[in-house]
Amino acid sequence: MLKDFVKSTPPEADVLKQRLKEERAKLFGYQMKLKEARLPVMVIFEGWDAAGKGSVLGKVIKNIDPRFFQVATMDAPPTADQLRRPFLYRYFVEIPEAGKFKFFDTCWMKEVTDGVCRGTLSDKEYDARIRSINTTERQLTDNGYLVMKFFFHISMKEQKKRLSALKESKNTSWRVSEEDLWQNRHYDECLEIFDRYLNDTNRSNAPWYIIDAKEQKWAELQITQFLNQGIDTALKNSAYAVPILQNTFRMKQMPLLKDIPLDKEISDEEYKDELRKLQDELSELHNEIYRKKIPVVIAYEGWDAAGKGGNIKRITEALDPRGFIVHPIASPEPHEKARHYLWRFWNRLPKTGHIAIFDRTWYGRVMVERLEGFCSENDWQRAYNEMNEFEKELTDFGTVVIKFWVQIDSDTQLARFTDRQNTPEKQWKITDEDWRNREKWDLYEEAINEMLQKTSTSFAPWYVLESVDKKYARIKALKIVVERLKKACRKAE
Amino acid sequence: MLKDFVKSTPPEADVLKQRLKEERAKLFGYQMKLKEARLPVMVIFEGWDAAGKGSVLGKVIKNIDPRFFQVATMDAPPTADQLRRPFLYRYFVEIPEAGKFKFFDTCWMKEVTDGVCRGTLSDKEYDARIRSINTTERQLTDNGYLVMKFFFHISMKEQKKRLSALKESKNTSWRVSEEDLWQNRHYDECLEIFDRYLNDTNRSNAPWYIIDAKEQKWAELQITQFLNQGIDTALKNSAYAVPILQNTFRMKQMPLLKDIPLDKEISDEEYKDELRKLQDELSELHNEIYRKKIPVVIAYEGWDAAGKGGNIKRITEALDPRGFIVHPIASPEPHEKARHYLWRFWNRLPKTGHIAIFDRTWYGRVMVERLEGFCSENDWQRAYNEMNEFEKELTDFGTVVIKFWVQIDSDTQLARFTDRQNTPEKQWKITDEDWRNREKWDLYEEAINEMLQKTSTSFAPWYVLESVDKKYARIKALKIVVERLKKACRKAE
């Protein structure tokens, strides 16, 4: 795309001024419409060094109320801390909330093309990054985000001129880095790399717009025009149903809930022995994964009163408190609801060497959100693949993802509910909502079966914990965690 | 995608039967909804040889009234005649009309992957094909088409078994070709090639669905499910506004109409001399382009009464009647209106060595259709890029594309209209509509200016013919045609 791009001819100064005035006013007017429609707008600025991204950004945001936008400056390389999470983490946590703009002063493109320029990113890694980026941009637009991507383009000569001017002045010379000069000396090679990236990520859901950045006002006009056009289109599409992609990840066959025998149990004595042995082992392994910098996600889902809490406790008892965190997941807070439904989980990802345990998870999308109508049918149907893609992103980074379904039958639930109701110190554990959910047992069972079938991938399979005997379930969970961590440690050697 | 795909487990026979019954009924029910919504559905079957595409197709169409579907069997290589037009031609002319299904028993995938398997398609050609295919699929879905792509997958063992069974029977042995056997022997290489193609063309607007084709009924169930899901999604999206892509083709700078001097003229004598000389030259060149197999498109647009007809006549006078055709373009017929707006032009593309002259063209989309509201704003805004892509497809094939804008001023038009009105033998040339259009002169001028700015690409630029002096315009047109054909002939040497 970049190679064919010829610098445009800006209109005469007075025409430019007039048109800029119009487009600025239009952008100003869109703010409230955005808010009403709860449309999140992610604006990405990429381009050549010294192309003027910062200055134009400064102009564009003048037309927007500061309450309605934020700027994320991402052009520094990832920090040591950020490197301990998947590549996309530091960007994903920055996505805008519904009804607001977020401007990215460089985004995932720069990190990838810098890697190619420096030769630190292999072809295979490059391909993986492109896949991750295309997947994420699709996930955002599928979930109602407007993603506008601008590439600021200047010629080699223009870049050289600007860098020299900056260097000559005492006040600005610090802004010219070795890298900027390197880029100018290797302009043609960089052009190839940029062009390849733009082509590889130019999709109709999130297309690239190349900006002729030779003159600042002209660049601003181009940006505001494209931005207004994009917002206008997006506002018309509030009822858009997204085509549902096939799930093509390798799947592990799962049984139907009704076919799972629940008579498994363990004696008190055996329980005590096993528990001690396994917890000791897990304790050791926790040190090992810390040293080997392996991140771990343990995800719990299960029926109300199935025994998730006690099960989690038997895991955490064995862990060093400095190296794990338990995330109880309730209904999303307003600021979480205002973003992509996976955002609050991206936000809680463990660093390398750490364990994050989720008490309820992103699978709420295809259970409670599906059944209570908190999202559209199109949303939850799409979600199976989206969650598999999310877990793929984690496991590709090296994360061990362990997913437990804690299973009991309806009679057991009733017995435990009744017990809770009748035991004063347990009454806080039972609510009207629990009883209401219980009435929908059959609908839930159908949804859970579909979830288990569609999200038990080879890289992040579900494990069913038969929990009529809670002790049995705890031992089984510990065994699985120990086994998975052992395997990961061996692999990391 | 294919490499990760694991054969699924079909449900029990009775469950399968029941679900198939439900999905068939659903598909049956969609027919009328499709018709009401005027939704065109393009269904593409690709896959391994002997995977059962034909048999499953036979089953699927049983649920559709024969008036609502057609089958296009495309698995033969292109004929000699088809090879004389751009790669996509033979497929594009087959696209379904609004409200109907068209099933493709193999489509552009097979032609491309066959080329790769046989080593007749270079990497560069492969990349160009992929670009063409992704562009075309996007153009279709952007214009309201539902494109459903199915890949029939079987294992090497299963394919071998089926080919052997076919071969053994006297009645079916003729169906096993050398190619089928070759494919089975080179299964792993073909898998790589197929997988690469599927990944390269798997877009959210037209995603791939891989079908486990081991059992026919199970394959049919998968197909009908995906098909119903796709139709359901598409029916919800009748008001979808498509993101508008930036036009990144290299552009030729064009003047505004008001800045074009119209005082150019030519003496009768010079006209006569030049006409004879240029027509002789063109006559020669027509032979040459025929021998060199160069296809030519000459596109005329211009104001009413600007002199298009007379101008075209001076071109055709010089041509061998067996080698050219003039297409007068009026409002689309119902069967044309029912398809992508470029379909009727794909349908009229010249063969290699032939000249097609269009008296009015696809640019009606951004003139009359825009101004009369025959398409949405989103439609015509998108059309500039779509038409550039269309012309790129033609010129990449080697077609010479010459576009004329025949320009007069408003006063000249009025004089010519009045003359037509007052001259009995010219009265047929003037209608009430001409007068009505004339009232919209300023709106048209704005639209034409935008069109000239946005579609004068380096590969298919516009030429303005100043036609207040019609003779001057004719000579200019002839000169340009001669020059362009000469250049193309030299290049083809």
Image (cartoon, coloured by chain):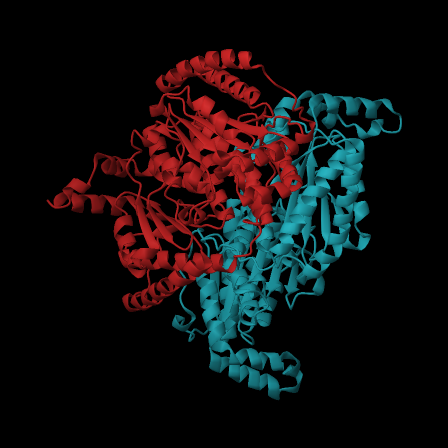
Chain colours: A red, B cyan
Expressed as whole percent of the image width and height from the top left, the position of residue B292 reads: 60, 46
Q: Is residue A488 above or below residue A424?
A: above
Q: Is residue A24 above or below residue A323?
A: below
Q: In the rendered image, which quarter contains the N terminus of chain B?
A: top right
Expressed as whole percent of the image width and height from the top left, the position of residue B155 reads: 69, 24
Q: Residue furthest bottom?
A: B422
Residue at 66 percent across and 26 percent down: it is: A260
Could you say which is closer to the camera, residue B64 or residue B309? B64
Q: Is residue B125 above or below residue B25?
A: above
Could you say which is closer to the camera, residue B208 or residue A363? A363
Give the total number of marks visible in the rendering: 0
Expressed as whole percent of the image width and height from the top left, the position of residue B58 reads: 80, 41
Could you say which is closer to the camera, residue B289 or residue B232? B232
Residue at 62 percent across and 82 percent down: it is: B432
Q: Can residue A34 be seen at all in this image of the molecule?
A: yes
Q: Can residue B455 be seen at all in this image of the molecule?
A: no
Expressed as whole percent of the image width and height from the top left, the position of residue B286 reads: 60, 54
Residue at 28 percent across and 66 percent down: it is: A13
In the displayed structure image, the side of residue B161 where residue B255 appears, left or right: left
Could you say which is closer to the camera, residue B344 or residue A352? A352
In the displayed structure image, the side of residue A184 where residue A242 appears, left or right: right
Q: Is residue A422 above or below residue B325?
A: above
Q: Residue furthest right?
A: B170
Residue at 43 percent across and 13 percent down: it is: A280
